[in-house]
Image: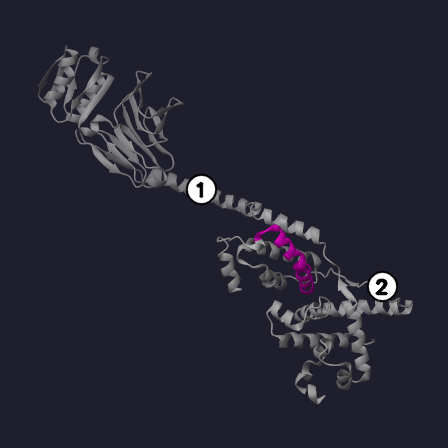
Amino acid sequence: MVIIFIIMSLTDQKADSLLCSETVFKSVFESHFKLLRNFLIFRYKNVERAEDTAQNAFVILWENCGLIKPEQAKSFLFTTAIRLSLNLLKHDKVVTNYELQSRSNGQHQESPEFLMVERELKIQLEKAINALPEKQRTVFLMNRFEKQSYSEIAALLDLSVKTVEKRMHLALLSLRKVIKNV
Amino acid sequence: MDTNSNNNENYLSDWLADKLTDQQLRAIVGESEFVAYERLKNSIGRLQVEDPDLARNYAAIKQKRIDKFKPEVRPTMSLYHYAAIAATLLLFFGMFQFFVFSNHVETAVGKPMLLAMSDGSKVRVNANSRLEYPSLFKYNRKVCLEGEAFFEVEKGGSFKVETSIGTVEVLGTKFNVFARGSYFEVVCYEGRVKVVLNDKSEILENGQAIRLYKGNKETWIEDDVQPHWLSGESSFLHAPLGQVLAQLESQFGHQVQYPKSLEHIRFTGSFTHSDLDISLKTICIPLNLKYQIAEGKIIISE
């Protein structure tokens, strides 16, 4: 946090940096926006708010483009977004407005019975995932949905790998407890 | 199980990261639980959140970047609000100061005075004059003048000189104001001043001068950089004699008596403040007048 404030206070000395070029900035946006936004959805359980915060993080990234190398952008974005989301998380409970989708899976045809059971399970899972504590849900979905390794998650969220593992374990354990009829 | 004993507490996360094999998990949780976990893992693996609309989000970021440079409407409004309240308070405070704590200086006959104002301006008040100014002059640069004064105004907000006849508003730096009785005269030596007479305003530039005498407005060009009285002389350009003699009274303190017919004769020239006799000569000789001093009175005759 302190580092960010220092960085932000140095914005005046905007040097010519790669990130300040529109094309580089746009490619950084294209490679990181989805992950950042989805992380914020896991956190907020709200798409609009997640996208708004993710956009704000990119605006702050742009304002500091002279001080940040493109390869540092991802970690800057996450640190910024977490800082931006702290107050929002504390104050109000937003109504959940996101839905999970089934990944299109064209590889093998599933039977109608299987699909029915799957749909039922999906609804239960959605509920169970949303009921998870925020910290467990974020880590769990970053790993399961976004395919981020434990060490990647640990780096992005400034946690130890051990903590990430703990949260993964607890998350799956809770899901198993909630969903009894698998 | 023994091989994984130190990871036991987080066996599910190890299994999800393929650090624990299916067999190992089966050994820990039992067959039926393993099937359930396997089922959960697969079902979760088939889920995702909807992909973002990248183009729309990128456009939103660009817009926010632009908006950040515009002043936000609400804080600005409330700022104006505060500014208005502050201005109102200042105004009331200023008026209070002006009316209650007004100061004044009165110069004695023959004793001009230099005033250094709190805003850095200098006012040289000529002899036998009165100048009023508010205590918080720095915030309310307005003076009332009866008599003559030369102003060197520091840059700042408006600077006003009010007299019984007209108002002089400063737009520049150095000017002289003379207001006594019905006679009013302003000479601008540097910059610009605005003179308000009977609701009509006139701007005097560098070197321009204006006088109001018997209801008539006269303008002329003044070549000097400062009024002569600052260097111990009174100087007149086509000025009515009544005015010249009133000035003489102010400088020397002797009452001057003269026939009414002389009052409106115009005089061009100057007199020194250091010697009454020389002064009387410089006034009377060019106009072909006689003078005598008796019992502290000066009597002038044709």
Within the magenta stretch, is there residue B200? no
Labels 2, 1: front one: 2
Position of B58 relative to B152 (above/below): below
Rendered image quadrant of residue A108: bottom right
At label 1, counting other C-alpha atoms closer than 10 Å, the crowd grade (few under 14, some 14-19, many 20 or more) is few
Q: Is residue B113 depicted above or below B8 in this figure?
A: above
Q: Residue furthest left?
A: B294
Residue flagged by tag 1: what amino acid is it? Ala
Looking at the rendered structure, whether the residues under marks 2 and 1 are on a common chain is answered as no
Identify the subunit bearing mark 1: B
Q: Quadrant of residue A171?
A: bottom right
Q: Is residue A24 left or right of residue B265?
A: right
Determine whether, in the image, residue A94 is placed left or right of residue A12: right
Q: Is residue B120 above or below residue B160?
A: below
Q: Which mark is residue A106?
A: 2
Question: What label sits on residue B87 in the rendered view?
Answer: 1
The answer, for residue B114, to whether it is visible in the render is: yes
Q: Chain of mark 2?
A: A
Query: Does the segment drawn in magenta span residue A32?
Result: yes
The amino acid at mark 2 is Gly
- Closer to us: B16 or A83: B16
Residue B127 seen in the figure: no
Q: Indicate the quadrant containing the C terminus of chain A: top left, top right, bottom left or bottom right.
A: bottom right
* 2 and 1 marks in contact (CB < 8 Å): no
- In the rendered image, the residue lying farthest to the bottom is B2
Rate crowding at label 2 as few (under 14), some (14 to 19) or many (20 or more) other CA atoms within 10 Å. few
What percent of the width, then of the height, locates residue A25?
61, 54
Q: Residue at x 24, y 33 (%)?
A: B124
The span picked out in magenta is A20-43
Dot 2: element: loop
- The correct choice, above or below, for B67 with respect to B289 in the image is below
